[in-house]
Image (tube, rainbow, N blue to C red):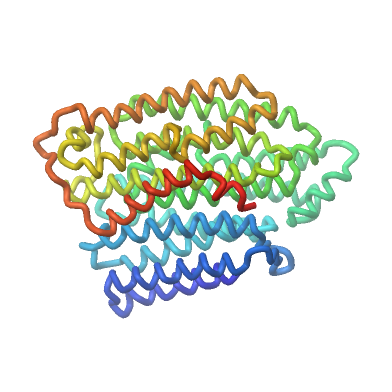
Amino acid sequence: MKTIILISIVGIASLFGGIFNVKNAILLIFILIGLILGVIFNINDWNTSIKYFNEMIWYDNYTIVFSSAMIIASIFIFLTCFSYYKKEFQHTSDIYGLVLFMLVGGIVMIAAFNFVMFFIGLEILSISLYILTGSNRKNKLSNEASLKYFLTGSMASGILLFGIALVYGATTSFNFQQISQKASTFTATSPLLSIGYLLITVGFLFKISAVPFHTWTPDVYEGSPTIITMFMATVVKTAAVGSFLRFLWLAKLSEALSFSHEWEIIFSIIATATLLIGNITALYQTNLKRLLAYSSISHIGYLLLGVGFMNNNPQFFNWIVYYLIAYSLATIAVFTVILVIKDNKNKVSIELEDLSGLGKTNPVLSFILSLSLFSLAGIPPLAGFMAKYYMFTIALEKNYLWLVIIAVITSTVGLYYYIRLINRMYREDASTSTTQLNITRPYYIVLIITSILLVIVGLFPQLITHLL
């Protein structure tokens, strides 16, 4: 709980930094110190498992692990801001403040033990994100992305809120545990509760961009400032998956509604569609951010193999956390490379052709990008391989062999378009605009640390898989 309070204070102080014209570097150092202290406070709260505000927030080990992963990802992203916003003298304090509020909203979503508190966290995150998506006011794509995200996101929030209202009508409670207890006493399945759970699930599926609720993702990823896209693909996704998992587990959805098999079929269909559409559509993308958008959709398909087929394996939650951490590390590294190219070429949009010849002119940068792409593809011994292996294991324990076969096939498709990027870097001649790129120190720090962690976490998965 101290972490939420601390980051909120840092966010408010960041807004005041703009009033007093605090330099960008000083402001970022202050924010990074606050985030590091947030991780330390989290570690200090380990094994306390305290409930606050009449059991509306539960700060247990689950909350600590997910929130720490989000904060560490935020530290990497804020490091890139030293270079990304170096030439920007206006509104950076506002952007940093909103990003921190977005992080607070995500932590509240994870920690929520009550639907009211969960929805408060969701709106804190969402409203900040709508504004940040359109923060590049001179870019029409950014304005368009902000409007699209606001309209579709508001509709999804409305659907989710309607589902919460129906669940309350059936159980007269917003508390997850009380909902589970009352639902388990029903002699027959409550239609009101079933529809409520279904609407809540639809809302969550939109937030994690699962098919068929994914259509906003490519446009928003492409139009948003790259820093915000990085937050969206890592921190926001971790918050959405973590809170969804908390809801499904504590509400004991399948047991309460007594249609576990039907529920698994629904998730298997959604996972299959997400895997197929995400990977196949990525094959046809020429814009790098749009390709990564469809790649992120496909990774949600792999995650649904775990989230949608929960089991009593004690390692279940650890494997989900491991996947999110492995995905976040690789994604941060890839987007940092995009930032390097954008800064050097002064281009609004990065196309695949901008990677041509990068292996010859910038071998270190190309190697780190290749390493990250191989991790996303699931190549051993990198973290992405073990992440996918764990998700496949969960589905196999539920006897969904056919779904694992589809996942393996789509992984092969994903490997193809990742290798296509690597092929452009190493086998195609450098374009006339490709020269030695200047990589600033903050970018180097993020790229080196994330690439090293991808190898370490891949070789020693027990560093994460024994946290919970």
Question: At which x and y percent is residue 79?
Answer: 34, 60
Query: What residue occupies the far front of the structure in this picture?
Result: 459
Query: What residue occupies the far right of the structure in this picture?
Result: 187
Task: Locate residue 202 relative to residue 281 in the image: left or right.
Answer: right
Query: What residue occupies the far bottom of the structure in this picture?
Result: 20
Comparing 65 with 181, the one in front is: 65
Q: Residue at x 44, y 36 (%)?
A: 381
Q: Is residue 397 visible?
A: yes
Q: Residue at x 15, y 40 (%)?
A: 361
Q: Is residue 6 above or below residue 101?
A: below
Q: Residue at x 82, y 39 (%)?
A: 190
Q: Is residue 149 above or below residue 29?
A: above
Task: Locate residue 38 relative to residue 467 in the image: left or right.
Answer: left
Comparing 117 with 391, the one in front is: 391
Quadrant placement of the N terminus: bottom right
Q: Residue at x 77, y 41 (%)?
A: 192
Query: What residue occupies the far left of the structure in this picture?
Result: 432
Q: Quadrant of residue 378?
A: top left
Q: Is residue 237 above or below residue 354?
A: below
Question: At which x and y percent is residue 4?
Answer: 55, 67
Q: Is residue 213 visible?
A: no
Question: At which x and y percent is residue 133?
Answer: 38, 52
Task: Locate residue 174 relative to residue 119 in the image: left or right.
Answer: right
Q: Is residue 321 above or below residue 119?
A: above
Question: At which x and y percent is residue 207?
Answer: 53, 44
